[in-house]
């Protein structure tokens, strides 16, 4: 299974949409499914639930500017917050566990996790340098790249960490398999992107061009692009070995559309009047979609089918994130 984090843009946060994850993600084997995780940010308070759409919320932290979540079947839920003071804190395995201070002077954070490689935490400093660590929340940092404006991470047990960055010069680059590996140039002329890891189908990368066109590829960092849709404002992706790629878009008119299983498949209309969308997917539970409604900042979620009913989560929400 796989969880994704999309690129994150500035304080306004297109994260886990992304993200980055946020969405904004992690991967585990089908034999040990990851617990579905949903996170919301409301009035600077990070709340997270796992295991069920109707599970109770756990109050994680206050004074939060951004939130990222991931999960895998071995290590459990991974939660990271960026405080308003610019400090990144993370915890894994227990929603009520203690925090590990990761880095200060940060502007963005994204996380992923898989059963083999463990937690992946990536942070963008206020100076535009991307740092990443994998395997332990207490591990050392690897400097990935300078001159970064957006980034996204994912991970799976077969291919390992997947990192994508948008440079300040406007070029999208990606690497997979090692934090010290080489970069592959992916695309220029884009406004947002998202990535997902999937051991069966390979890396999934989607971009939103400056003209509002979504393109996606899966299987290889050098695979060809498939044109998905035009008139898009935001996008989110996930993937798992059973259900294949999951792509969700938020149109410029505020409608959420999604497709799963095939990059050239048809779209399902999910919701109208949304401002954010986050997605995850796993072999056991299938697609997880979370949206933020324009009216009242209401967060809603559905799991298992693109045609399933929505479950109301919380109102007065400013950010949504999910993982599976």
Image (cartoon, grey):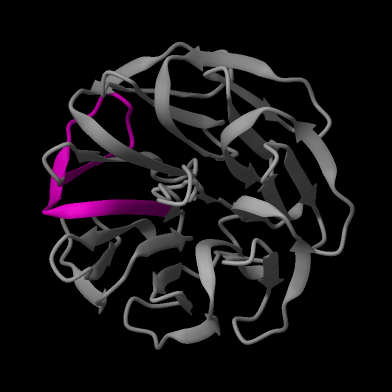
Q: Position of residue 183 (x, y in %)?
A: 71, 20
Q: Nearer the viewer, residue 83 or 110?
A: 83
Across and down, in percent, residue 151 comes to: 58, 37
Q: Is residue 275 magenta?
A: yes
* Horizontal side of residue 30 vs 146, given as left or right: left
| Residue located 13% across and 45% down the image | 255
Comparing 100 with 107, the one in front is: 107
Quarter-of-image position of residue 189:
top left
Q: Is 57 situated above or below 262?
A: below
Q: Number of marks in the image?
A: 0
**Residue 178 seen in this snapshot:** no
Residue range in magenta is: 255-280
Residue located farthest toward the right when viewing the structure as drawn: 140
Q: Nearer the viewer, residue 227 or 20?
A: 20
Q: Is residue 28 above or below residue 51?
A: above
Q: Residue at x 38, y 78 (%)?
A: 52
Classified by dominant secondary structure, the portion drawn in magenta counts as: strand
Q: Residue 186, can we see it?
A: yes
- Is 228 on the left or on the right of 138, as rendered? left
Residue at image location 18% in from the left, 27% down from the top? 231
Measured along the vertical axis of the image, is residue 57 above or below residue 241? below
Q: Is residue 264 left or right of residue 67?
A: left
Residue 296 appears at what percent x and percent y?
Answer: 17, 71
Give the quarter of the image for residue 153: top right
- Residue 74 lies in magenta, yes or no? no
């Amino acid at each position: 299974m796989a969880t994704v984090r999309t690129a994150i843009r500035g304080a306004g946060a297109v994260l886990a949409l992304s993200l980055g994850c946020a969405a904004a993600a992690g991967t585990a084997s089908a034999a040990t499914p990851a617990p579905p995780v949903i996170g919301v940010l409301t009035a600077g308070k990070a709340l997270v639930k796992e295991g069920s759409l109707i599970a109770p919320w756990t109050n994680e932290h206050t004074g939060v500017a951004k939130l990222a979540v991931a999960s895998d079947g071995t290590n459990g839920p991974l939660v990271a917050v960026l405080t308003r003071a610019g400090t990144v804190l993370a915890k894994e395995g227990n929603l009520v566990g203690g925090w590990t201070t990761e880095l200060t002077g940060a502007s963005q954070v994204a996380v992923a996790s898989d059963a083999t490689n463990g937690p992946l935490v990536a942070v963008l400093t206020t100076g535009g340098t991307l740092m990443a660590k994998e395997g332990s929340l207490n591990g050392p940092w690897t400097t990935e790249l300078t001159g970064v404006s957006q980034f996204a991470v994912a991970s799976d047990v077969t291919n390992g960490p997947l990192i994508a960055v948008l440079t300040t010069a406007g070029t999208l680059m990606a690497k997979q398999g090692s934090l010290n590996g080489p970069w592959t140039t992916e695309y220029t002329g884009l406004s947002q992107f998202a990535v997902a890891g999937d051991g069966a189908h390979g890396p999934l990368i989607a971009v939103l061009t400056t003209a509002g066109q979504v393109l996606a590829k899966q299987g290889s960092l050098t695979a060809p692009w498939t044109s998905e849709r035009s008139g898009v404002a935001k996008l989110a992706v996930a993937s798992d070995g059973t259900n294949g790629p999951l792509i969700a878009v938020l149109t410029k008119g505020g409608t959420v559309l999604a497709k799963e299983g095939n990059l050239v498949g048809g779209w399902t209309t999910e919701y109208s009047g949304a401002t954010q969308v986050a997605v995850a997917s796993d072999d056991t539970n299938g697609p997880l979609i979370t949206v933020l409604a324009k009216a009242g900042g209401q967060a809603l979620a559905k799991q298992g089918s693109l045609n399933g009913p929505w479950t109301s989560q919380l109102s007065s929400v400013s950010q949504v994130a999910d993982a599976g």
